[in-house]
Image (cartoon, rainbow, N blue to C red):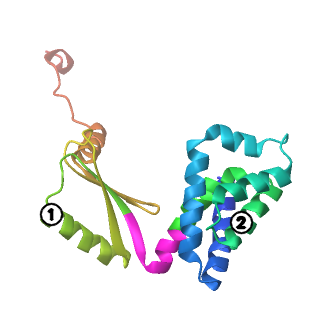
Amino acid sequence: MLNTKAATRYAGALFKSAREGDLIDGVYVALRSLAELLTASPRLLELLKSPVLAPREKERALRDSLGPGAPPLLGNFVALLAAKKRIDVLPAVADAYHRLVNDYRGLIEVEVASAVALQPAEEERLVRALERQTGRKVILRKRLDRGLLGGLAVRYDDTVIEGSARSSLRALHRQLLKVRIPLPARDADRGS
């Protein structure tokens, strides 16, 4: 939770500076590339977090990883993270920065899980409904989930819309468990 808050703050500051310098895309591409490198190389990330490596060496390694085409703003940013010993938040910063870029452009990524592939007409109706609901242009990320019995599970931002058959059956099950059905009196209980 603390890393998420720190990542969001760092991403916000980086985005503001990138916007002011008209560097949003350049920073995004280089930041995403660096975050992917660190995520794919856990040993590299551990080395960069290690107190054995001096902050200047960490900064140099990070700047070298960015490559010559990266905006200097991002080089300064990763140097700041190295100095503050917060390299570990860099992948989360990249994710938060990505969300800020989408917000800035009026976009929202929506993940839709379904038991079977959506038909083009269903997909189009879903996108239109989500765009009305969110007020943003939807980027649909579809995936098949054989665990669903039917229906859809939709996720975006902090919202989950569970319209699957499995969730409906769970809700029905919970309701049935609450129902009390009186049992008929047995003959022995009636005093016969």
Q: Which residue is at 20% across, 64% downward? A: 123
Q: Residues within 10 Å of mark 2 (few under 14, many from 20)?
A: many
* Local secondary structure at mark 1: helix
Count of marks placed on residues: 2
* Local secondary structure at mark 2: helix
- Residue 120: image location, x then y, percent: 15, 63
Asked if the stretch drawn in magenta spans residue 108, the answer is: yes
Q: Nearer the viewer, residue 56 or 129?
A: 56
- Residue 37: image location, x then y, percent: 58, 49
The rendered magenta stretch, by its main secondary structure, is classed as helix
- Camera-near label (2 vs 1) is 2
In the image as oriented, which residue stretches furthest toward the front?
A: 68
Residue type pointed to by label 2: Gly
Q: Which contiguous range is marked in magenta?
A: 99-109
Above or below, 74 against 36 in this view is below
Above or below, 122 against 73 in this view is above
Please give left or right for residue 86 compared with residue 90 in the image: right
Q: Nearer the viewer, residue 125 or 50?
A: 50
Instruction: Measure how far apart labels 2 and 1 are at the Cα level.
Output: 43 Å
Q: Earlier in the sequence, mark 2 or mark 1?
A: 2
Above or below, 5 against 38 in this view is below
* Label 1 sits on residue: 120
Q: Residues within 10 Å of mark 1 (few under 14, many from 20)?
A: few
- Residue 134: image location, x then y, percent: 37, 74
* Label 2 sits on residue: 75
Residue type pointed to by label 1: Pro
Please give left or right for residue 48 compared with residue 115 in the image: right
Please give left or right for residue 26 compared with residue 142 in the image: right
Residue 63, picture quadrant = bottom right
Above or below, 79 against 20 in this view is above
